[in-house]
Amino acid sequence: MSAFQYRRLRRSPFMAVTLIFAMSLTADDGGSAVNQTTTLPTTRPYGEWMSPITTDQIVAESIRVSTPLIGGTDVYWLEGRPQEAGRSVLVRRSADGQTSDVTPAPFNVRTRVHEYGGGPYLVANGVIYFSNFSDQRIYKIEVGSVPQPITPDSGMRFADYRLIPGTHRLVAVREDHSGGGEAVNTLVLLDIEHPSDGIVLAAGNDFYSAPRVSPDGRQLAWLTWNHPNMPWDGTELWLAEISTDGNLADVRQVGGGKDTSVFQPDWSPGGVLYFVSDRSGWWNLHRLGEDGIEDLYPADAEFGQPMWGFGMSTYGFESDHSILCVYTVNASDQLARLNLNTKTLTDVKTAYTNIGSIQVNGSHSVFVGGSPSRFSQVVMLGGGDSGSGLTLQESTSLEVDEGYISQGRAIEFPTEHGLTAHAYYYAPANKDFRAPDGERPPLLLMSHGGPTGATSDTLSLPIQFWTSRGIAVVDVNYGGSTGYGRAYRKRLNGNWGIVDVDDSVNATRYLVAQGLADGERLAIRGGSAGGYTTLAALTFRDVFKAGASYFGISDLETLVRDTHKFESRYIDSMVGPYPQSLETYQERSPINHIDDLNSSVIFFQGLEDKVVPPNQAEMMFTALKERGVQTAYLAFEGEGHGFRKAENQKRSLDAELYFYGKVLGFAPAGNIDPVAIANAR
């Protein structure tokens, strides 16, 4: 009997209990007798290793932590809990170290503005304001009280709100879907004491975000942009005076433009407007001075991020003279302190290589951090130069022996046109097993979503799920990803379905040539835009034997016609304007070239997905099934763009492993519910 021991640490405000469990292999599993103290691992083929990292543990012991805020002496954050059907709960840690839920069930702190949401709550003067997912109303609540709505039940959506100091008014982004056509986005003024849909402050553009009120309550800054731009293409920074009646005066553009992306405007304690701009080709910190825009620290580094959601933050003020910030080089994050008097940047040593959502309040800060050896977690950092932090909440309470952990290794590999691209490679790792001599592992390529986004090397249970079973993983930051400057980000312009696919193929070729993967057992997976890259690679290249598409795009024309407002013109830059570029859309849509797809594909789809509607997966599955290709389709009721329910996360990951085993020719260890595979061989 082979024993796999690991610890599950459950945390509460009062105690931590360590539970020891043992998992065993029986003779039916093909295992051999290995004692805990045995130094020689069991020899079994790659893909057939028994792992202590199961889907049951992943979903039972994992949450999603995000969006920390500091409110006085308290710290708040959101927890997405698969065990509660994906409900997003606001959590508070008080100054005495006690942690408790703020929002009771069934409240779900989540806004649907831009569909991706973000910025769904605010803490101001001891009062919490939050958007509730089911009705999209804003509620206010004081700790220990019952939430009370401050907007009517009209179907309006709100996000990214800020309180005007000394008043009972909120400035917010509003999204109106009542007109029947394209949603209308505006900036509005809300009266906390008199519920209404708000008074419009700014309108006429397609999108608005980041309304930020000066400390004295007299000025308002915000970002706006229009189709076909996405916020990382070009945004305008506007500034106005707030009159006593709440209207705006002296409205003027002070930064950004059609070809310059501005990110996170914010006010210093003394009332100076700061922001991040990529006008140099890199997202760098700037401020608006009496003589115009001042570049604070020019560097070939990213101090900003693609604004997929509201409320994103990469810097904050320790004082009028110091900023605590995060910058990114080659997709790796570094915490630093910028002296605003000397304009010198000093790195702050931490244990984290991936840092986001930083919030600063005087001498303390809080952020979400992760690293190759640390799961994503909420961290509170003290002042001074110390980088030591206090972990407030981890995204998983499952603690896995390091003998089952594969740490990501950054690789740079050659790709088309004499360029290089980037990825993280994870070798198979399981202290209890080794592969037969001469065998190379199957390789699973992961294609991140966006596609304007990036993957990181933060320790991830889903990745370790594969590597601990003997399957190598390569997580690719193909051309178009962020973290490498605007030029790298623009590689995808006009080339979606080409550059990302080429980089994916070349990543696998590089690893096969290095002897790190079996060239006959290559698979690719991705969600959303990553699902499109997956399907395009399977259709237009003869490299991958299997693939998994999570709510992926198969028909670019259907995507343009059916998707939501925020992304409705996204593809203009990556493919071409529609319908003028109709031929290109058809050429790059996998559904139109089904006869070229001979690899096996499994599809996963939420039936309430508004970003990539279910008909995308359904059309592709039906076409493959009729052609005799091995394929499977799993649809989940009540799920949107991304799976939030524990049972669906478990089922999809188990099903994907089962599918790869059948297609790539290995027998996964353990008991997995079978999947109905059309045209199974």
Image (tube, rainbow, N blue to C red):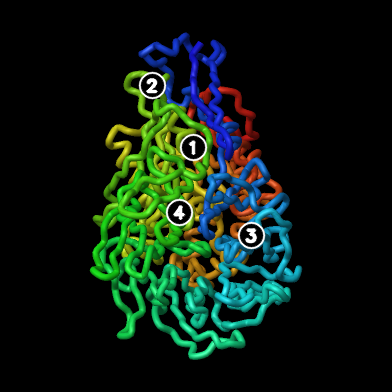
Q: Is 564 on the left-hand or right-hand side of 435?
A: right
Q: Which mark is residue 615?
A: none
Q: Secondary structure at mark 3?
A: loop
Look at the image and tell me whether residue 596 can be seen.
no
Q: Position of residue 583 (x, y in %)?
A: 49, 67
Element carrying mark 4: strand
Q: Is residue 642 left or right of residue 291?
A: right
Residue denoted by label 2: 435
Q: Nearer the viewer, mark 2 or mark 1?
A: 1
Q: Are marks 3 and 2 in contact (CB under 8 Å)?
A: no
Tell me the amino acid under the disc marked 1: Leu
Earlier-in-chain disc, 4 versus 1 = 4
Q: CA distance from mark 3 to mark 1?
A: 27 Å
Q: How far apart are labels 2 and 1 at the CA level?
A: 22 Å
Up the image or down, 564 lies above or below 479; here it is: below
Closer to the camera: disc 3 or disc 1? 1
| Residue marked by disc 3 | 610
Q: Amino acid at mark 3?
A: Lys
Q: Contact (CB < 8 A) between labels 2 and 1?
A: no
* Relative depth, front residue between 188 and 587: 188
Instruction: Please report whichever mark, 3 or 1, sits nearer to the chain's N-terminal start.
Output: 1
Q: Which residue is mark 4?
A: 366
Residue position marked by numbered label 1 in the rendering: 461
How many other residues sit within 10 Å of disc 1, few (<14), some (14-19) or many (≥20)?
A: many
Q: Secondary structure at mark 1?
A: helix
Q: Quadrant of the C terminus?
A: top right
Query: In front: 620, or 120?
Result: 120
- Of circles 4 and 3, the one toward us is 4
